[in-house]
Image: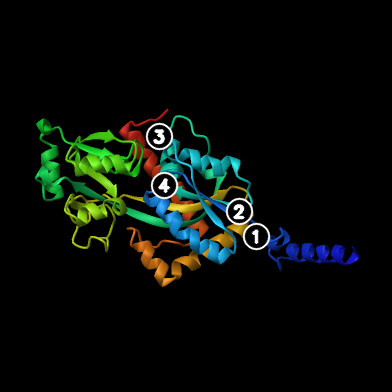
Amino acid sequence: MQRRTLLTAVVTALCAAGTVSPVLAQDGWPSKTIRFVVPYPPGGPTDLMARLLQGELTKRLGVAVIVDNKGGAGGNLGSADVAKQAPADGHTLLLAASGPMAVNPTLYRSMPFNPLTDLAPVIQISSFPLVLEVHPSLGVKNVKELIALAKQAKQGLSYASAGNGTPQHLAGELFNTQMGVDITHIPYKGAGPALNDVIGGQVGVMFDILGSSLPHIQSGKLLPLAVTSAKRTPQLPHVPTMAEAGVTGYEFGAWHGIAVRAGTPQPIVDKLNNTLNAIFKEPDFKAKWEAIGTPVVAGTAAAFGELIRRDTVRLGKVVKDSGATVD
C-alpha cells in the first residue's frame, strides 16, 4: 500500500510539473475499443474515408476501431451522438463533415448540438473539389455555353443535389448567384439518387463531389465542364478550374475532419492528431487516399478549428442567400 501510494504521488507530481503526460495518469489511452461515428449511411465517400482509416488506427493505437454509421438529419444525428452522448474520453471519434459542422447551423431551424462548442477539432482530413458536370445530351461543351443556355428562360434548366444544404446544393446556388442565372434546384435524398437521374438524363446538370462522379465521367456517361477547386485536380488533369473556364472568384469544396466531444483531455487530442499525421505521411496510404479524389490535408487541430469557424460564416451566408431552410 505504501509503495502504491508513493507511486501515485510521484505520477501526480510529475504531471503537475509537466514531465509526464496526464494521459498516463488516466490509466493509459486508449484503453478500450474506439467507436468511429460516420454521420451518413454506408457506401459514400465519407464512409469510405472512415474505413480506410479504421485499419491504420487499429494498428497504431493497439485497440479495435469500429465504424458506426449513424445517418439522418443531414448528418446531425450522428454528429449529435458524439457531441452530446459520448463520454469525453477519446474513445468515440466523429468523422466531421462540412455539412453538419458548418452548413447545418444556418440551414436547420433547430440544431441538436453546437459544432463550435460541443465538439473539439482534431484534424482536417480531406478537401474535396466538386465537378460541374452535365449529361451529354444537354449539348454544351463548356461553362460559357452552359451559362448561355441557362439564360434562355424557355429551356427550364435544372440541377440535381444530394439535398438541401449539401455541398452539391450550395455549389449550385453560388453558381446561380455569381452568374446571374436561375438554374432550378432539385433536391434528392442523397447523392446516389441524384447522380442516377443525371446519368439517366432526367436532370441536366449537377455539381458533385469528384470521388462519386469520377467513374461515370471516365465512362463517358457524364461530361465534366470544370472543377470548383483553385487548381486542377490530378484525377481530371484536362478539366479546367472554374476560373480557367471564365468564372472568376468561384471556389468551392467539401471537407472532412476528425472531432471528439468537447472536454476531451488535450493530451488525447494531441496524440490523435500526431497519430493521424503519421498515417497520412505513409506513401502507400497517401496513394489510396488521393485515389478517392482528395489531396492529403492533415495539419494541426487549431487549423481545423479555424476552418470550421470560417466556413460557418462563409457557407452560412450562401445558405441565407439561397433561402433554404429545414425544420
Residue 90 numbered tag: 2
In front of the other: label 3 or label 4?
4
Q: Is residue 243 visible?
A: no
Q: Residue at position x 63%, y 48% from top?
A: 88
Front-most of 140 and 219? Answer: 219
**Residue occupied by mark 1:** 29
Residue 42 numbered tag: 4
In front of the other: label 1 or label 3?
1
The amino acid type found where label 1 is placed reads Trp
Residue 289 lies, in percent from the top left, at 38, 62
Q: Residue at position x 58%, y 57% from top?
A: 269
Report whether 134 appears left or right of 103: left
Q: Are the residues tagged 2 and 3 within 8 Å (C-beta)?
A: no
Report whether 153 appears left or right of 279: left
The amino acid type found where label 2 is placed reads Gly
In front of the other: label 2 or label 4?
4
SS at badge 3: helix
Q: Disc 1 and disc 2: Cα gap in Å?
A: 8 Å
SS at badge 4: loop
